[in-house]
Amino acid sequence: MRLLKEQSGQAVVVSAAFMGLIALGFLALAVDAGSLFREKTMAQGAADAAALAAAEELSAGNSSNEQTVANAIAKLDGFDTTLATNPATVTLTTPSSGDFTGSSYVQAKVSWPIATIFWRAFAGQTATTVSAQAIAGESQSETCVCLESTSGDSLYMDNGAKINSQSCGVIDNSNASNAIVITGSTLNALSVGTVSTTWDNATNISAGGAVNSSNIVKGITSTCNPAMPPVPSYSTCYSDPGGTSTSFTAGPSSASGVICYTSLTLGANGTSDTLKPGTYVINGGYLTFESGANGHSNLGGDGVFFYLAGGASLTIDNGANVNLVAGGATESGGGTAPTVGVYNGYLLYQVSGDTVALTVAGGSTSYMNGALYAPSAQIDLSNGSGSTVTGGVVAKSLNMIGGAILNATSTTNEGSLGLGSAKLVQ
């Protein structure tokens, strides 16, 4: 009993030592956790700076210098890639997945092995790698007005015309000094890009005209060249059912269907004609909207797409109040127009190579919502506030007069304009 009594204090010593080791372990873990959190925060800052620096080199056309600049910026943030022992690494890649992919973006990953106390003592690891990544890219502006003429004034605006494209941009492929001429009219755009390096705002804007854009880029090399809609499949082309004093209903049997007319006249002789949803091919003749009954050329027209081929032309007469809405677009009274498959967002396409100008005059209550594509022809928008078109435009040239309004939106892919400045995106 006396022997046991003399050894009873040893348990207290062992317990105290054990508890001390546990306390030291927790203290080491806390120190490591705080250190790793701090280093992780610093690594994220270094990755952000490295990605942004690399993207700036990319937007300036110095892609071969991206890695050197990224390494230098990371070193300034405390991540040195030149150390003899445990150097940091900066890896640059082109993102291949996620919301920001492609050659306009750079992803930077910054890594560095960090010495630890807890992991060295209790797990046998001398260091833990801390890493962070970021993505940066050149500021981009989606294109919603693409003018493909390489010479002359491919955008002409006069007498109160207006383009509103605050969420997207205008690209003009003309290399002429008068590529854009604005007289007493207004161009509001997120961006304006011209191939011409000599286009002069002061010379070509007059009579109270204005270009309101904080991003005007001259001498661009990446011009707009959007993909064109595919050719619809059809066989028989019917003769024009219009031109009489009797109203009629035209169109395919379903919104996904296709019908072909050699010509199509709506609103002739005071008629009120109805267009079913679907795809309309006009082959070789004309697509004409006249004033119709009570100023209405057509009833319906929600979820329609017109494909003009064989030299076909479009004319919307002065006073013709049309209601034309592309598949999937917003209807005049709200709601969404029926879908037309691959042609959703497109309202009209005149095939490449056809040079007959498209004329849109219109009345006081017209509603047109969808992209207009005529890559080889001029589009004329004219005649007062009734000539309001919502959607993108692709044309050889665009001529707007007499208060015509284009509310340009990027409903279809027309490319983008690099604004020459880099920003973090992720």
Image (tube, rainbow, N blue to C red):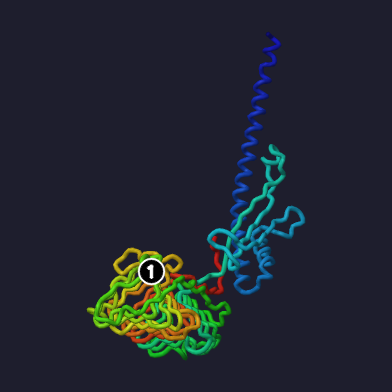
Q: Which residue is under mark 1? A: 278
Q: Nearer the viewer, residue 401 or 165?
A: 401
Q: Residue at x 35, y 71 (%)?
A: 251
Q: Farthest residue to the top: give it.
A: 1
Quarter holding the N terminus? top right
Q: Which residue sits at x=35%, y=68%?
A: 277
Q: Residues within 10 Å of mark 1 (few under 14, many from 20)?
A: many
> Which sits in the foreground, 159 or 7?
159
Looking at the rendered structure, the secondary structure element under dot 1 is: strand
Which percent across, then down, holds residue 60? 61, 74
Rendered location of residue 79, percent (x, y) = 67, 58
Query: From the viewer's perspective, is 254 left or right of 190?
Result: left
Q: Work out which quarter of the rendered image holds the C terminus and state it.
A: bottom right
Res. 320 in view: yes
Measuring 66% from the left and 68% from the top, which residue is drawn there? 66
Across and down, in percent, residue 209 comes to: 40, 86
Left or right for 284, reference 422: left
